[in-house]
Image: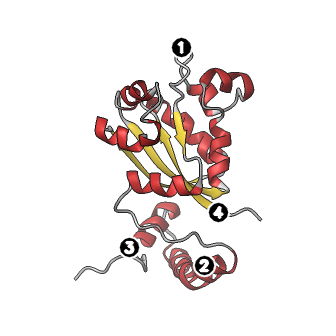
Amino acid sequence: MEKIQRTLAMIKPDAVDRWPHIEKIIMDEGFTIVERRQVRLTRAEAEEFYAEHRDKAFFNDLIQYMTSGDVLALILAGEDAVVHWRTVLGPTRVSQAKEEAPESLRAQYGSPTNDSHNAAHGSDSITSAQREIKFFFPDLTLEPVLTGEGAKEYLSHAVSPTLVKALTELCKVRPDDPIVWLADWLLLNNPNKQQTQ
């Protein structure tokens, strides 16, 4: 059985304006977007993120590219998310992606004139994903992903009672726009919401 994982996806500066198309692909592939953050990396931040490439010839060009505009950092969750997202991305070099995986994100949105301007990034391992998620979302606390019996127990004890109350009220009130009413009710009655004094 495949395992639910989280991975970091990053839409690079030259592809941020293609976000609506990329988001559709992400959703069609079955990922859940857990969190997102648009940010412009400083040179120091880009150098820290790509520190493993510091001694490589392309390092300065990479840093210049990654600081040329905003990036969109995403936490994606899904079955075998690390490998799945890397498959959706396609090969690192744009020309290779176009040849070997023409439907991949890098083939579709990477630069036709610069092989290394490949539109998007994905963590290459669970360990890298944890480090990279922490880099972009340092204050975010992520609970372990629940699967199997743990997920069933959480749903039956935490989610189902709230939904039953919400749907019962919905049937009593019979609002003109039930979806908006239900969304508002759930926001107001969220049992996990911090209580204000």
Badge 2, how many Cα within 10 Å: few under 14, some, many 20+? few
Q: As displayed, is residue 62 above or below residue 5? A: above
Residue 64: image tag = none
Type of amino acid under label 3? Leu
Furthest residue to the right?
1
Circles 1 and 3: CB atoms closer than 8 Å: no
Q: Is residue 56 above or below residue 95?
A: below
From the viewer's side, name the closer residue of 194 and 106: 106
Task: Count every numbered label the image shows and give the total.
Answer: 4
Residue 72 position, x and y percent, is 42, 41
Residue 188's disc is 3
**Disc 2, SS:** helix
Q: Which mark is residue 113?
A: 1
Q: Position of residue 41 (x, y in %)?
A: 33, 38
Query: Which of the two residues, 152 or 134, is positioned nearer the viewer here?
Result: 134
Residue 74: x and y, percent?
47, 48
The alpha-carbon separation of the residues under discs 4 and 3 comes to: 30 Å
Could you tell me which quadrant the C terminus lies in?
A: bottom left
Q: Amino acid at mark 1?
A: Thr
Q: Earlier in the sequence, mark 4 or mark 3?
A: 4
Q: Check disc 1 and report its element: helix, strand or loop.
A: loop
Q: At 46% across and 51% down in the image, what residue appears?
A: 132
Label 4 is placed on what type of residue? Ile
Q: Residue type at mark 2?
A: Leu
Of tags 2 and 4, the one toward the viewer is: 4
The residue pinned by badge 2 equals 155
Cα separation between marks 1 and 2: 49 Å
Say which label, 2 or 4, has the lower sequence index: 4
Residue at which label 4 appears: 4
- The CA span between labels 3 and 2 is 19 Å
